[in-house]
Amino acid sequence: MTLQEFLAELELFASEANRCFQAAGDLTALEAARIEFLGARSGRLKQLQKSLGQLPSVDRPQAGQRFHQVRREVESAFQAAQERLADRQKTVRSAEVFDPTIPGVRPVVGHLHPITQTIDQLKEIMGRLGFSLADGPEVEDEWHNFEALNIPPDHPARDPLDNFYLAAASRLAGGAGPSMLLRSQTSTVQIRVMERQKPPVRIIAVGRVYRPDTPDQTHSPMFHQIEGLLVDRRVTMADLKSVLRMLGMSYFHGEVHIRFRPSFFPFTEPSVEIDMNWQGRWIEMGGAGMVDPNVLRAVGYDPEEVSGFAFGLGIERLCMRQHGIDDIREFYRNDVRFLRQF
C-alpha cells in the first residue's frame, strides 16, 4: 500500500464514521457504530493502524501524523453524537405527561409492633390520669435493683440463678465495686426518681426487664413491664384500686372489675396480687401494694409524713389478653403473618 492509498483510506474512514454517528437514532445504534469504527479489537481504525506498519519507513511519519488527526476527529464526532442522543432522551422524559388514570404502585408501609402499640396506649391512659413518664438504665447495680427496694442480701430474689449478673459490667464499674446486672424489674426507675425528687411523685416506668426464665407460652427471659408509683400525703389502697380500675376500663374499653388477693413483696406492705375481670373472666395481671416504709427511708422520705402505692403489670400479658393471644413467644418470632394482624 502506498502513502496516497493509505491517506485515501483514512479520509473514507472518517467520512463514513461521521455519517454513521450522525445517522444513529438512539444510543444502542450509536454503540454499534462505535464498535464498527473504533472497536479495540476488530474496528476499522484498528485495521488502518495495522496497515500503517506496512508503509515504507520514509512515509510513516506523515501517515502517522494524519492517522492520529483522523482518530481524534472521529472520537470527537462520536462524543458529540453521544451527547446529542442523551439530551434528546432527557427532553423526551421531561415532556412525558402524568396520567392520573394509570394505576399507581402502592408503597409498602409497615406499622408498629403490637407491644409498642400497647405501650403507647398505656402511656396515653396514664398520662390522662396525671402520671408522667420516667426512664432508667437497663443495666443496674444491686442498690437500685435490690437493696433500696428492701430486698436483703439473703433474699431468694437475689440468687444468681434468678438474675442476669454481668461480670464484665462489674469490672468496668471498678472491679471491687457493686455487682451489675440486667434489671429484673422497672421498680429501679422508681428508686432513681425518688432519690432526686421530693414528694409528691406521680410516675410510670415502662421498659424491658430480664429474668432467666425458660421460654414457654407464658414466660420469656425478656419482657416488658409498666410500673406506677404515687407518693403523697394520705395515699391509700382505695386510690390504688381506683387507678387500676380506670386503667383497665380505658385499655379494654369496657367494664372491668379489680380484685386484690393478699401476697408478699419486700418493697410493699401490705402487698396484693391484682386480678382483672373482663368479659366474664378473671386473669392475674401483676402485683401491687403500699410502698414499704423501709423503701421510703432508703430514698430519704419520712414515712410518717407521706405514703404511697406502687403497682407493676406485664405489658405482654395485657396485650395477649386484649387480642386473644395464647403464646408470648409469638411477639418475638418476627413472623410477619402474625404481626400484620395488628
Image (tube, rainbow, N blue to C red):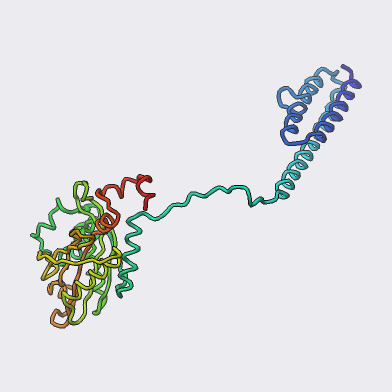
Q: How many marks?
A: 0
Residue 92 % position (x, y) = 73, 46
Is 86 displayed left or right of 200 in the figure? right
State which quarter of the image contains the N terminus: top right
Say if residue 98 shows up in the picture. yes
Residue furthest to the front in view is 280
Residue 13 % position (x, y) = 84, 27
Residue at the location (91% across, 22% down)?
4
Residue at the location (16% across, 74% down)?
237
Say if residue 177 shows up in the picture. no
Residue 131, placed above or below residue 261: below
Residue 177 % position (x, y) = 19, 60
Image quadrant where residue 89 sits: top right
Q: Nearer the viewer, residue 68 or 45?
A: 45
Residue at the location (21% across, 58% down)?
184
Residue at the location (20% across, 67% down)?
257
Residue 303 % position (x, y) = 14, 79
Image quadrant where residue 45 sits: top right
Is 11 displayed left or right of 108 in the figure? right
Q: Nearer the viewer, residue 130 or 46?
A: 130
Q: Nearer the viewer, residue 250 or 306?
A: 250
Residue furthest to the right in view is 4
Image quadrant where residue 248 sits: bottom left
Is 251 displayed left or right of 92 in the figure? left
Residue 223, placed above or below residue 54: below
